[in-house]
Amino acid sequence: MTDWPSEWTSISQEFSQRLSKLKMVIFDVDGVFTDGTILRDELGNEQRRFSVLDGHGISRLRDLGIFVGVVSREPSEITKSRMEKLKMDEIHIGSRDKSKTLKEILNRRKLDSNFVAFMGDDIPDLAAFSEVGIKLAPANAQPQIRNQADWISKASGGNGAVREACEVIIYSIENSRQSD
Protein backbone atom coordinates (compact mmCIF):
# COMPACT_ATOMS: atom_id res chain seq x y z
CA MET A 1 0.00 0.00 0.00
CA THR A 2 1.85 3.00 -1.28
CA ASP A 3 -0.14 5.73 0.48
CA TRP A 4 0.16 4.21 3.97
CA PRO A 5 0.86 6.85 6.66
CA SER A 6 4.13 6.28 8.51
CA GLU A 7 2.31 7.03 11.80
CA TRP A 8 0.32 3.78 11.54
CA THR A 9 1.46 0.22 12.03
CA SER A 10 1.51 -1.35 8.59
CA ILE A 11 -0.72 -4.28 7.64
CA SER A 12 -0.65 -6.97 4.98
CA GLN A 13 -3.12 -7.02 2.09
CA GLU A 14 -4.66 -10.17 3.61
CA PHE A 15 -5.17 -8.50 7.00
CA SER A 16 -6.60 -5.41 5.31
CA GLN A 17 -9.16 -7.65 3.60
CA ARG A 18 -10.10 -9.15 6.99
CA LEU A 19 -10.49 -5.66 8.48
CA SER A 20 -12.64 -4.55 5.56
CA LYS A 21 -15.25 -7.16 6.48
CA LEU A 22 -15.68 -6.05 10.10
CA LYS A 23 -19.23 -5.51 11.34
CA MET A 24 -18.33 -4.47 14.91
CA VAL A 25 -15.36 -3.14 16.86
CA ILE A 26 -15.37 -3.31 20.65
CA PHE A 27 -12.83 -1.60 22.88
CA ASP A 28 -11.65 -1.91 26.44
CA VAL A 29 -11.50 1.53 28.07
CA ASP A 30 -8.72 1.91 30.68
CA GLY A 31 -5.38 1.57 28.92
CA VAL A 32 -7.02 1.82 25.48
CA PHE A 33 -9.19 4.99 25.44
CA THR A 34 -7.14 6.27 28.40
CA ASP A 35 -3.52 5.89 29.43
CA GLY A 36 -4.74 3.90 32.44
CA THR A 37 -4.39 6.77 34.89
CA ILE A 38 -7.25 7.48 37.27
CA LEU A 39 -6.93 10.70 39.25
CA ARG A 40 -8.73 11.16 42.57
CA ASP A 41 -8.92 14.34 44.58
CA GLU A 42 -9.04 14.52 48.40
CA LEU A 43 -12.84 14.05 48.30
CA GLY A 44 -12.54 10.89 46.20
CA ASN A 45 -13.78 12.53 42.99
CA GLU A 46 -12.45 10.69 39.98
CA GLN A 47 -11.06 12.12 36.75
CA ARG A 48 -10.04 10.45 33.49
CA ARG A 49 -8.70 11.94 30.27
CA PHE A 50 -10.30 11.04 26.91
CA SER A 51 -9.25 12.30 23.48
CA VAL A 52 -11.72 13.93 21.10
CA LEU A 53 -9.52 12.57 18.30
CA ASP A 54 -10.40 9.02 19.37
CA GLY A 55 -14.04 10.07 19.50
CA HIS A 56 -13.89 11.31 15.92
CA GLY A 57 -12.47 7.95 14.82
CA ILE A 58 -15.42 6.20 16.50
CA SER A 59 -17.83 8.53 14.70
CA ARG A 60 -16.17 7.74 11.36
CA LEU A 61 -16.54 4.00 11.96
CA ARG A 62 -20.21 4.46 12.80
CA ASP A 63 -20.68 6.49 9.62
CA LEU A 64 -19.45 3.46 7.66
CA GLY A 65 -22.08 1.26 9.32
CA ILE A 66 -19.73 -0.43 11.79
CA PHE A 67 -21.20 -1.13 15.24
CA VAL A 68 -18.93 0.18 18.01
CA GLY A 69 -18.88 -0.54 21.69
CA VAL A 70 -16.96 -0.81 24.93
CA VAL A 71 -16.60 -3.53 27.52
CA SER A 72 -14.82 -2.38 30.67
CA ARG A 73 -14.31 -3.99 34.06
CA GLU A 74 -14.18 -0.65 35.86
CA PRO A 75 -17.61 0.65 36.94
CA SER A 76 -17.09 4.34 36.15
CA GLU A 77 -19.81 6.94 35.65
CA ILE A 78 -17.26 9.14 33.86
CA THR A 79 -16.60 6.37 31.35
CA LYS A 80 -20.32 5.66 30.94
CA SER A 81 -21.03 9.34 30.29
CA ARG A 82 -18.21 9.64 27.73
CA MET A 83 -19.30 6.51 25.85
CA GLU A 84 -22.91 7.70 25.79
CA LYS A 85 -21.72 11.00 24.33
CA LEU A 86 -19.87 9.03 21.63
CA LYS A 87 -23.16 7.20 20.89
CA MET A 88 -21.60 3.79 21.32
CA ASP A 89 -23.90 0.98 20.18
CA GLU A 90 -22.84 -1.19 23.12
CA ILE A 91 -21.79 0.15 26.53
CA HIS A 92 -20.88 -2.44 29.15
CA ILE A 93 -19.25 -0.80 32.17
CA GLY A 94 -18.42 -2.93 35.22
CA SER A 95 -18.28 -6.20 33.27
CA ARG A 96 -16.57 -8.80 35.44
CA ASP A 97 -16.49 -11.39 32.62
CA LYS A 98 -15.63 -9.83 29.27
CA SER A 99 -15.88 -13.17 27.48
CA LYS A 100 -19.45 -13.67 28.67
CA THR A 101 -20.35 -10.06 27.79
CA LEU A 102 -18.94 -10.43 24.28
CA LYS A 103 -20.76 -13.73 23.73
CA GLU A 104 -24.01 -12.03 24.75
CA ILE A 105 -23.41 -9.11 22.37
CA LEU A 106 -22.59 -11.39 19.43
CA ASN A 107 -25.59 -13.64 20.10
CA ARG A 108 -28.03 -10.75 20.51
CA ARG A 109 -26.77 -9.00 17.37
CA LYS A 110 -26.42 -12.30 15.47
CA LEU A 111 -22.81 -11.54 14.54
CA ASP A 112 -20.19 -14.06 13.47
CA SER A 113 -17.12 -13.61 15.68
CA ASN A 114 -14.89 -13.56 12.57
CA PHE A 115 -16.35 -10.14 11.73
CA VAL A 116 -15.81 -8.63 15.17
CA ALA A 117 -12.62 -7.01 16.53
CA PHE A 118 -11.68 -6.25 20.13
CA MET A 119 -8.95 -3.86 21.28
CA GLY A 120 -7.52 -4.57 24.72
CA ASP A 121 -4.37 -3.92 26.69
CA ASP A 122 -4.22 -6.10 29.81
CA ILE A 123 -4.61 -9.68 31.08
CA PRO A 124 -8.41 -9.50 31.62
CA ASP A 125 -8.72 -8.80 27.88
CA LEU A 126 -7.34 -12.23 26.96
CA ALA A 127 -10.79 -13.70 27.65
CA ALA A 128 -12.32 -11.15 25.28
CA PHE A 129 -9.73 -12.01 22.63
CA SER A 130 -10.99 -15.60 22.65
CA GLU A 131 -14.45 -14.43 21.50
CA VAL A 132 -13.49 -12.37 18.43
CA GLY A 133 -11.91 -12.91 15.05
CA ILE A 134 -9.56 -9.92 15.14
CA LYS A 135 -7.47 -8.94 18.16
CA LEU A 136 -6.07 -5.40 18.39
CA ALA A 137 -3.77 -3.87 21.00
CA PRO A 138 -2.24 -0.48 21.78
CA ALA A 139 1.55 -0.16 21.77
CA ASN A 140 1.69 -0.12 25.57
CA ALA A 141 -0.32 -3.34 26.04
CA GLN A 142 1.01 -6.00 28.36
CA PRO A 143 3.31 -8.55 26.65
CA GLN A 144 0.75 -11.36 26.92
CA ILE A 145 -1.75 -9.22 25.00
CA ARG A 146 0.77 -8.11 22.38
CA ASN A 147 1.74 -11.76 21.83
CA GLN A 148 -1.90 -12.65 21.07
CA ALA A 149 -2.76 -9.55 19.03
CA ASP A 150 -3.20 -9.63 15.26
CA TRP A 151 -2.25 -5.94 15.10
CA ILE A 152 -0.52 -3.54 17.50
CA SER A 153 -0.81 0.22 17.07
CA LYS A 154 2.20 2.51 17.07
CA ALA A 155 0.30 4.76 19.49
CA SER A 156 -0.24 4.00 23.16
CA GLY A 157 -3.58 3.83 24.93
CA GLY A 158 -4.91 7.30 25.68
CA ASN A 159 -2.52 8.73 23.11
CA GLY A 160 -4.12 7.89 19.78
CA ALA A 161 -4.31 4.07 19.78
CA VAL A 162 -8.09 4.06 19.31
CA ARG A 163 -7.91 6.61 16.49
CA GLU A 164 -5.12 4.69 14.77
CA ALA A 165 -7.14 1.47 14.93
CA CYS A 166 -10.21 3.26 13.57
CA GLU A 167 -8.25 4.82 10.71
CA VAL A 168 -6.61 1.52 9.74
CA ILE A 169 -10.04 -0.15 9.65
CA ILE A 170 -11.55 2.76 7.69
CA TYR A 171 -8.65 2.69 5.23
CA SER A 172 -9.17 -1.06 4.73
CA ILE A 173 -12.91 -0.66 4.17
CA GLU A 174 -12.51 2.22 1.74
CA ASN A 175 -9.66 0.49 -0.10
CA SER A 176 -11.79 -2.65 -0.46
CA ARG A 177 -14.74 -0.66 -1.83
CA GLN A 178 -12.53 1.05 -4.42
CA SER A 179 -11.25 -2.28 -5.73
CA ASP A 180 -14.77 -3.76 -6.10
Image (cartoon, helix red, strand yellow):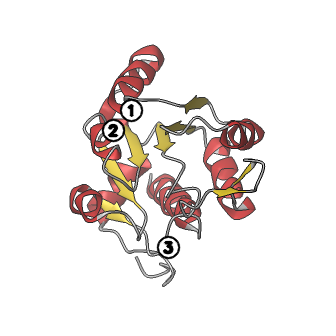
Residue 146 position by quadrant: bottom left
Note whether 75 is above or below 117 in the view shown: above
Mark 2 is on which residue type? Ala
In terms of depth relative to the viewer, which is nearer, 23 or 31?
31
Mark 1 vs 2: CB contact within 8 A: yes
Question: Where is mark 1, residue-wise?
Answer: 98
Could you tell me if residue 21 is visible in this image?
no
Mark 1 vs 3: CB contact within 8 A: no
Q: Earlier in the sequence, mark 1 or mark 2?
A: 1
Q: Nearer the viewer, mark 1 or mark 3?
A: 1
Note whether 129 is above or below 136 in the view shown: above
Counting other residues with Cα less than 10 Å from the Cα at mark 1, is it few (<14), some (14-19), or many (20 or more)?
many
Could you tell whether 57 is left or right of 35 in the image? right
Note whether 143 is above or below 81 in the view shown: below
Q: Earlier in the sequence, mark 3 or mark 2?
A: 2
In terms of depth relative to the viewer, which is nearer, 125 or 106?
125
Mark 1 is on which residue type? Lys
- Provide the secondary structure element on which disc 2 rests: helix
Question: Where is mark 2, residue-wise?
Answer: 128
Query: In the rendering, at what x and y percent does residue 118 appear?
Result: 40, 45
Q: Earlier in the sequence, mark 1 or mark 3?
A: 1
Q: Looking at the figure, which quarter contains the N terminus? A: bottom left
- Provide the secondary structure element on which disc 1 rests: helix
- State the separation of the CA atoms marked 1 and 3: 24 Å
**Mark drawn on residue 155:** 3
- State the separation of the CA atoms marked 1 and 2: 5 Å
Residue at 33 percent of width and 62 percent of height: 151
User: Total marks drawn?
Assistant: 3
Query: In the rendering, at what x and y percent does residue 88 appear?
Result: 65, 36
